[in-house]
């Protein structure tokens, strides 16, 4: 079941798909006005959606298996990979409407698809870089003593909390969680550059992850996501209240 946070995180992407699809349907590049209205809109919006799904899939694969690739190389590879399913989609649509293009022009069609894919990927990279530059804490990252123990897919994820489980540590991020062999005290030392605090003898929480606080049975809990809450013990409660956490 999709959480409210996940749905909210998808809204900017959906808006971007609709905006780009509408913009391209108005321009009608590559003689796409032949589809008429609203056919041209569904044509471009559908291709943008296909490209978005493909881009997310390939981005996930790069983050998991090639997390240290240079940004420029990753962007170029993504633009080419995203072009493949979109090119197949264009080919199928042309065949379905009875206007298949000859094999000889396939390289040209692929290049035209790649031009748009490269533009969209470049805009995405620039937007991501701008959002990071506007956040003074964006360069603050946990030490490698912690991140190197995480699965590749989580090494660049936003850290939400650390939870001690016997001799293990559960690392909660916005992309999922992982159980690693590490003491909580060592992990807290590895995240000292982040704005966070210990809330319980078994918990450390990143301040930016806190959505709200709840009280019940004389105790407080910090709500991080729809499915994740962190306890606040009496030992740490006064300090957290004084710091304005709740």
Image (spheres, rainbow, N blue to C red):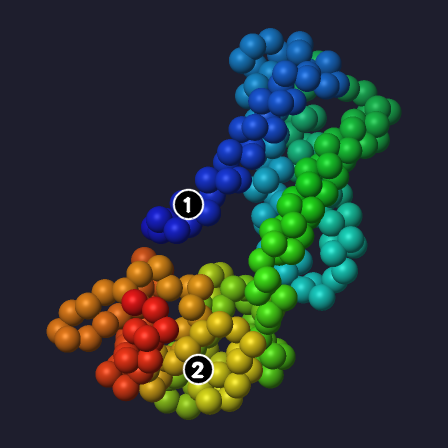
Q: Residues within 10 Å of mark 2 (few under 14, many from 20)?
A: many
* Residue 227 in view, yes or no: no
Q: Residue at x 64, y 30 (%)?
A: 89
Q: Residues within 10 Å of mark 1 (few under 14, many from 20)?
A: few
Q: Which of 36 and 6 lies nearest the eye of the viewer?
A: 6
Q: Could you tell me which secondary element the residue under label 2 belongs to?
A: strand
Q: Could you tell me which secondary element the residue under label 1 belongs to?
A: helix
Residue 161 as seen in the image, left or right of residue 26? left
Disc 2 marks which residue?
Answer: 169
* Residue 236 in view, yes or no: yes
Q: Report the residue that reaches farthest toward the right.
A: 104
Marks 2/1: CA–CA distance:
29 Å
Q: Residue at x 31, y 82 (%)?
A: 236
In the rendered view, would you say 200 is above or below 45?
Answer: below
Quadrant (top left/top right/bottom left/bottom right) for the C terminus: bottom left
Q: Mark 2 or mark 1: which comes first in sequence?
A: 1
Q: Report the label total.
A: 2
Residue 83 position within the rendered picture, expressed as x and y whole percent measured from the top left: 71, 38
Q: Which of 72 and 127 lies nearest the eye of the viewer?
A: 127
Q: Report the residue that reaches farthest toward the left.
A: 217
Q: Quadrant of residue 214?
A: bottom left
Disc 1 marks which residue?
Answer: 8
Foreground mark, 2 or 1, reads: 1
Residue 106 position within the rendered picture, expressed as x and y whole percent measured from the top left: 81, 28
């Amino acid at each position: 079941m999709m959480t409210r946070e996940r749905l909210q995180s998808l809204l900017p992407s959906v808006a971007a798909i609709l905006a780009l699809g509408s913009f391209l349907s108005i321009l009608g590049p590559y003689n796409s006005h032949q589809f008429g209205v609203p056919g041209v809109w569904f044509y471009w919006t559908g291709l943008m959606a296909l490209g978005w799904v493909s881009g997310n899939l390939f981005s996930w694969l790069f983050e998991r298996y090639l997390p240290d690739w240079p940004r420029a190389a990753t962007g170029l590879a993504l633009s080419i990979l995203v072009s493949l399913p979109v090119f197949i989609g264009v080919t199928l649509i042309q065949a379905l409407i009875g206007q298949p293009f000859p094999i000889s022009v396939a390289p040209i069609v692929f290049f035209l698809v790649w031009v748009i894919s490269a533009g969209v990927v470049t805009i995405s990279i620039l937007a991501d870089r701008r959002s990071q530059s506007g956040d003074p804490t964006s360069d603050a990252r946990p030490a490698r003593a912690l991140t190197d123990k995480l699965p590749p897919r989580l090494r660049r994820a936003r850290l939400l909390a650390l939870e001690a489980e016997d001799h293990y540590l559960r690392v909660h991020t916005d992309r999922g969680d992982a159980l690693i062999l590490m003491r909580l005290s060592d992990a807290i030392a590895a995240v000292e550059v982040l704005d966070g605090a210990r809330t319980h003898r078994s918990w450390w929480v990143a301040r930016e992850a806190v959505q709200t606080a709840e009280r019940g049975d004389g105790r407080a809990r910090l709500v991080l996501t729809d499915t994740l809450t962190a306890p606040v013990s009496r030992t740490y409660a006064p300090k957290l209240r004084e710091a304005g956490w709740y």
